[in-house]
Amino acid sequence: MAVRLQFENSNDIGVFCNVTNAYVLTAFGGSENFYSVFEAECADHIPIVKTSVCGTTLVGRMTVGNKNGLMMPSGTTDQELMHVRNSLPDSVVVQRVDERLSALGNVISCNDYVALIHPDLDRETEELVADVLGVEVFRQTIAGNVLVGSYCSFSNQGGLVHPQTSIEDLDELSSLLQVPLVAGTVNRGSDVIAAGMAANDWIAFCGLDTTATELQVVESVFKLRNAQPANIVNEMRSSLIDSMM
């Protein structure tokens, strides 16, 4: 299912939240309506954590994470780090990263298996992405844009990329990520995909301006029509238990 919402009159809800299969991070300071949407869709299955990052509400752009881990920028305060660590499941590794390109959500995009990163990211950061998030890492651009975290959004089921991505690039990215990709927009024509939406394997949250057609494309490519969160969370738990045995 795909849901539309706003954060304090802003449709760029991907800026203010980070949605994964194991947890949701949201910014402090939004209206109760904003949080209630997340609670209605996710609270029965995964924890929802209200936090700030580097003293800002830009949680979705400053952090990057998946079911295995969460990476936070070097400006994250000790208090914020401890709050997030204490709120997330023990299986999620939370790591603060000393990286010059500190808006990690803009320069890294990932699902539970693969990450795309900015071509100029430090070698140490690349290794940390592989270790903390437990993913294969590829240095990429999307439609000529180096901010891979901003111009695409993908889950383990599918993904949406910048509308001007060529067919060749789309095929290449799709084979790297091993999920179907579609070039499209959110928020009535915005090409900054990850700012306008956030998704996991069973739910997508889009800005209030997103048209019915855009919503349909999101539901279709992310395979959200019949997604059952309980099944996905149970699969994750059983695979976690298998890996611990």
Image: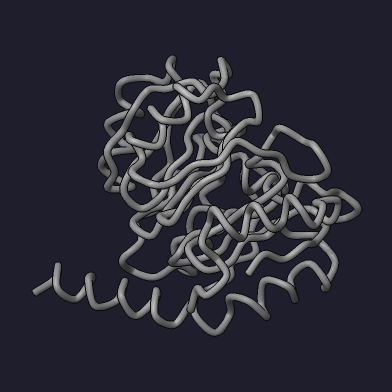
As drawn, 139 above or below 68: above
Res. 2 image quadrant: bottom right
Res. 34 image quadrant: bottom right
- Residue 242 lies, in percent from the top left, at 14, 73
Q: Residue farthest to the front?
A: 167
Quadrant where the N terminus sits is bottom right
The colour scheme used here is one colour
Answer with left or right where residue 33 lies relative to residue 36.
right
Res. 110 image quadrant: top left
Quadrant where the C terminus sits is bottom left
Q: Residue farthest to the right?
A: 9
- Residue 22 lies, in percent from the top left, at 43, 67
Q: How many marks?
A: 0
- Residue 52 lies, in percent from the top left, at 66, 52
Q: Residue farthest to the left?
A: 245
- Residue 137 lies, in percent from the top left, at 31, 33
As drawn, 99 above or below 90: above
Answer with left or right where residue 210 lies relative to residue 116.
right
Residue placed at 50% from the left, 53% from the top?
81
Depth check, front residue: 232 or 63: 232
Residue placed at 65% from the left, 54% from the top?
17
Answer with left or right where residue 2 lies relative to residue 114.
right
Depth check, front residue: 38 or 156: 156
As drawn, 184 above or below 11: above
Residue placed at 45% from the left, 22% from the top?
168
Residue placed at 44% from the left, 82% from the top?
230
